[in-house]
Amino acid sequence: MQQQPQWVGIDVSKANLDVYLRPSGKQFQFNNQTSGIVELIEQLQAFEIKQVILEASGGLELEAAQALQEQGYAISIINPRQGRDFAKASGKLAKTDRIDAAVLAHFGQAMQPAVTVLPNANEQTLQEFVTRRRQLVDMLAAEKNRQSSLRGKMRQDVEAHLEWLEKRIEQLDREIEELSQEQEQWRCRIKVLKSVPGIGKVIATTLVAALPELGQVSDKRISALVGVAPFNRESGKYRGSRTIWGGRSRVRSVLYMGVLVAVRHNRILKSFYARLLAGGKAKKVALIACMHKLLRILNAMVRDGETWRVPASTD
């Protein structure tokens, strides 16, 4: 066992896992299949591993990341933009799989990103069900848009597809409901979330599936994960408007839909939204601020296991 801690960068492709250890400089390549992942873990056992850094690669990284996490390794899955920006800042303009693996290891050592906790098998199943429902809803909306411009046989074909989609979505809703009730923790979280005016069953289930960190991390961290934390844009005398970027777009989308309802029916957010508009904020900016506030409220409620109640102060 080597005593010097190693930061591991893994560049993931459909076929291979290119691995780089820093500071030892060791390089390996394994196939991105179960057999190759087993070899990877066996090879890493000869080193003291500090952290393993991978980029999100459309799901290609998940099997390796899950196996590494199960073996007790601290992993971090970062946005590819972070890795690319770090490479440019480090003067690494060339791009190959081996170079990218080395950049990821360097990124881990220099930036020490937060550890990613992957969902367990049950959580993954719930995520897949919720994702599939969203895909079908998107297909339903697209087919409805096409329906108005079609005639005759093609219109009948679209109408038959619409009927099938509606039935399948209803079936998925029942399956998601059954699945979400199997776990006591999920039942409690969904009950807490649904108690908030503006948060319905679909939004609550999506938050449980796609944002398992809710109630487990700080308000600042949860806002960054979702991508509703505003970032300053200032330099010298320049004062730009603050912007949001990054984060989990799917969570942000359902949260936005919840806020549209909440600013009409939730006393706290309705008052907050009105004050922002009265202060000259644009509607979109005010809605994003309400999303931020709603997320912090939900985070505290799930953390404390408390259902909705109107606070004494509405600030």
Image: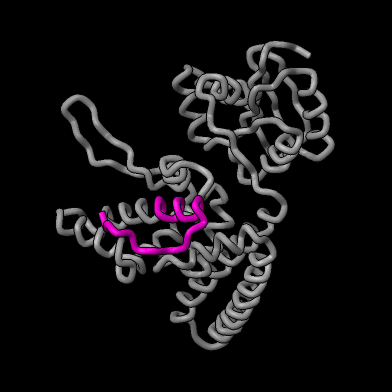
Q: Residue at x 33, y 38 (%)?
A: 231
Q: Quadrant of residue 278?
A: bottom left
Left/right of residue 307 with respect to residue 186 in the rendered view:
left
Quadrant including the N terminus = top right
Quadrant including the C terminus = bottom left
Nearest the eye: 311 or 241: 311
Q: Is residue 264 above or below residue 59?
A: below
Q: Residue at x 37, y 43 (%)?
A: 229
Q: Is residue 216 above or below residue 142?
A: above
Q: Position of residue 148 (x, y in %)?
A: 44, 81
Left/right of residue 267 with respect to residue 19 in the rendered view:
left
Left/right of residue 32 with respect to residue 199 in the rendered view:
right
Q: Residue at x 82, y 26 (%)?
A: 42
Nearest the eye: 17 or 114: 114
Q: Residue at x 29, y 36 (%)?
A: 232
Q: Position of residue 89 (x, y in %)?
A: 44, 21
How many callouts does the rendering have? 0
**Does residue 297 show up magenta in the picture?**
yes
Q: List the single residue furthest toward the front.
A: 312
**Does residue 254 show up magenta in the picture?**
no
Q: Is residue 263 above or below residue 20?
A: below
Q: Which residues are magenta?
A: 295-315
Q: Position of residue 142 (x, y in %)?
A: 49, 71
Nearest the eye: 113 or 19: 113
Q: Quadrant of residue 33?
A: top right
Q: Position of residue 126 (x, y in %)?
A: 65, 60
Identify the colour scheme used.
Answer: one colour
